[in-house]
Image (spheres, grey):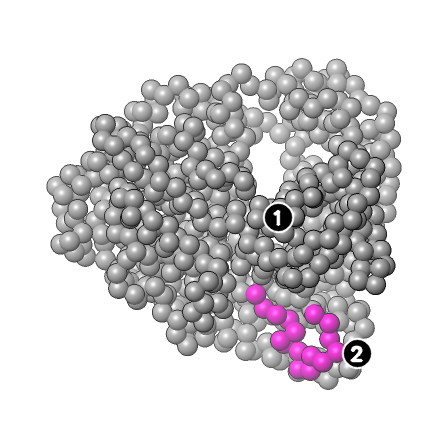
Amino acid sequence: MPRISRHRFKGIAAALGVVVGVSAMLGAQDAKIDPSQADRITARIVAELIERAHLSKPEIDDEVSAKWHEKFIESLDRGKLFFTKDDLAEFEPFKDELDDQIRRGDLSFAQMVFERFRTRLDERFEAINAMLDEGFDFEVEETYIDDPELLDYPADAEEANERWRKELKYQLLVQMLNDTEYDEAVKRLKIRYKDNLYRYFRQFEMLELMEFYLSALSQSIDPHSEYMGWKNLEDMMNQQLQLSLEGIGASLTMEDGLPVIKEIIPGGAAAKDGRLKAEDKILAVEKEDGEIEDFYEKKISDVVRVIRGKRGTTVKLIVQPAGTKERKTYDIVREKIELADQHAKGEVIETTAPDGTPLKIGVINLPSFYGDTAAVRRGDANAVSATGDCKKLLAEFEEQGVDCVMIDLRGNGGGLLLEAISLSGLFIDTGPVVRVRDADGILPYNDEDAGTAYDGPLAVLISHTSASASEIFAGVIKDYGRGLVIGDSSTFGKGTVQSIIDLNNWLRNPEGFPNLGALRLTIQQFYRANGMSTQVRGVTPDIHIPSVADHIEKLGEGEMDNALAFDEIDPLPHEHWGRVSPELISQLIDRSSKRREEDEKFQKQAEAIQKFIDRQTRKDLPLKKDLFIAEFKSDEDDEVEDLIDQPESMARPAADDKKVWNRESFYNQEVEKIVGDYVTIGAEVVASAPVPAGVRDGDRN
């Protein structure tokens, strides 16, 4: 397990200590702060923190200003469907002034651009509805460009509307391709654009505009830094990291201006009550004083906050059950909701190795490196922790006599650094797990708890969307020769650490201030025990199984704007378990390749991947219905098509699906065979191989 020392966070503290000058610079504040003044102060603190605490110590100058200018406009109109060339010409003079404005807390550029965007939104929304009412000719041979980077902004409203006409036609064809009737597809698009586009931006508050604008600044430095208003900060801390919240246990969506139940979370208050169902509309809540708070055309985030509340309290929901015109009142007592579908899950599968040997494989599906850090540190036995959950599963696997453990990290985007370190400690004895470089230098994070929770054969399954903490863990397993890494050609390549900085902590006199939110700032970079950063390059597998994800454009850290560069430092000495030798890997690759060459589904997958590659090289898609269907509709096996459309889908079970591992997937079946070979021939190959430096006598079996 990792050592928690008083020096652990000294780099962060040192980096942030200089920011105290921000609050001194702001001077004493009035007891009551008006919102516009708070916004100006927030902007100034964010700028100072970026310059003084970011890992790269950037200067917000004219060059950054130009990037920021472009990124903010893009954040509002990524598809180049709203602004015109005249709008861009009007914004152009501010290109090198944003750096000067931010030092004054001047947010006028953001407000000007957003007001123009809303004007264009009104115009385009009217045109969208008119076109959807009028209908489309799907027999005309014309094309749609699906990459906005290849387009300039439209010259005028007429060109913008023409671009929207093709966009709508494309969206309708996509829905009809999935067997949706035309009239239903039109209805869905109308709801989508009204609720998720028009109403969303029409209900925008200054807090949300600040998030767009200040995040555009921070992401002009690196792609993972961002400003979060207090609402998003609260959601991120509770839901994403601690995997819990307090409320009724239901997820909502907006349809025609009203919140609609999308899903009832198993085990939550609503599920136990039993009356609330998917597709029910939530019309309002009745408050304690009897006042009715209507939800029509309310922002979904505000609706959620009204319905949520402390456990043990009651919320009175006024509901229109699906398919009726009735109004019913449901009193539901709020509870703490554990997001169980996002916790680690385990399953023992019984399979047969290619040589006929029966095997038991313990599979752990880990969606993220979650945890309640404060509870873990104070020794709370019930603390939410990815490491704690995995440790319990490993104990269960041992009792069932598994021959190998497999950790499935496909689609795992990371999470808490400390969880990655402690989880690694379950599989290695002691030694370096990761090093981080910050403003103070390079700091090692070691596993210093002798012993392991599991020391048998181990496999780790990765994908291109395995990122950050996933890459630390996979890197440890590979560097130590502890187990076999299988999957896509590399992980995502996110090798940086972000810290959440509460902006109110940097005020000299915080009394009277509202919650200013937080800055999620890149302050450190990861390095593996072998000295290589995981940044951009990620972690490569021992055994590569081809996937469409290997060929998706703009997938991976290296494809992101302003990503920090890869580098490396000197390696650290560490034990090598000798469980994965070059000779063994060579044999496993050869056996897997031969099986895939002879497997009809992998042959079809190879053809489908090539078709996908060819399709990506063409940026214009046909909008004539029969040509569009021929382009995208395939006679291939449905399962192969699923892997092309959603290459990670087989790794993430649905919330109500108790299966951890999809044994019907031909991809997963090949993984089982690889693991079977690894377990059955591995001991013999490793035993005959030269002893690697640092291998202990007891580790050759």
Place of residue 297 in the rendered image (x, y in percent of width and height, measured from the top left): 82, 48
Q: Secondary structure at mark 1?
A: helix
Tell me where residue 671 appears, x and y as whole percent.
Answer: 35, 34
Of the pair 48 and 70, the residue shown nearer to us: 48
**Residue 442 against residue 479 in the figure, above or below:** below
Seen at 21% across and 49% down, the residue is 578
Q: Which residue is mark 2?
A: 32
Magenta part of the chain: 500-515
Residue at 28% x, 62% y is 431
Q: Is residue 22 visible?
A: yes
Magenta span includes 422 = no
Spatial separation of the CA atoms under disc 2 and disc 1 = 44 Å
Left or right: residue 679 versus residue 409 is left
Residue 486: which disc? none
The residue closer to the viewer here, 266 or 112, is 266
User: Do we see residue 94 in this rendering?
Assistant: no
| Mark 2 crowdedness (10 Å alpha carbons): few <14, some 14-19, many ≥20 | few
Q: Residue at the location (23% across, 46% down)?
A: 579
Q: Position of residue 391 (x, y in %)?
A: 36, 55
Is 501 inside the magenta-drawn segment?
yes
Residue type at tag 1:
Lys
User: In the rendering, which numbered label is found on residue 272?
Assistant: 1
Dot 2 or dot 1: first in sequence order is 2
What residue do we see at 46% from left, 62% from top? Answer: 382
Going by the numbered disc 2, the residue's amino acid type is: Lys
